[in-house]
Amino acid sequence: MVTNTITVLEYTCEKCRYKWISRVNGKDRSKPTRCAKCKRWDWDKKAEKAKYMDLPTEVVQNFAEDFIRKNKGIFDALAD
């Protein structure tokens, strides 16, 4: 039995993290224009970091607590 090692390119979508091999009729294609799963055109661009990620944890926590306190009636209605 003869075994051969082949090398293929695996692509990873930066948005949905899907991984795939782009092949047509058993041959490698050029770089894909869209993600095979989510169909985004910018699949190979790094996702932008959310602006709140740079804030200190206590600032985000305080904002969340204030939001919940101000909208308590809405959350109580959803719980029922």
Image (cartoon, rainbow, N blue to C red):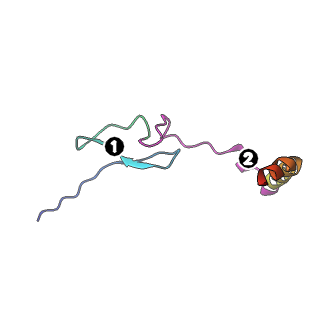
Q: In the shown orientation, is residue 57 left or right of residue 12?
A: right
Q: Indicate which disc residue 7 carries.
A: none
Q: Is residue 63 above or below residue 33?
A: below
Question: Is 41 a magenta residue?
Answer: yes
Q: Quadrant of residue 2?
A: bottom left
- Amino acid carrying label 2: it is Tyr
Q: What's the magenta region?
A: 36-58
Cβ atoms under marks 2 and 1 closer than 8 Å: no
Majority secondary structure in the magenta region: loop
Q: Which residue sits furthest left?
A: 1
Quarter containing the C terminus: bottom right
Q: Where does the image place residue 32, in percent across and percent down from the top left?
A: 38, 37
Q: Residues within 10 Å of mark 1 (few under 14, many from 20)?
A: some
Mark 1, residue position: 22
Label count reads 2
The percent coordinates of residue 77 (x first, y second) are 81, 49
The secondary structure type at the circle numbered 2 is helix
Secondary structure under badge 1?
Answer: loop
Residue at screen point 47% across, 45% down: 13
Magenta stretch contains residue 26: no
- Residue ID for mark 2: 52
Dot 1 amino acid type: Ser
Indicate the quadrant containing the N terminus: top left, top right, bottom left or bottom right: bottom left
State the CA–CA distance, disc 2 to disc 1.
36 Å
Point out residue 24 in the picture as x, y percentages from the top left corner.
Answer: 27, 40
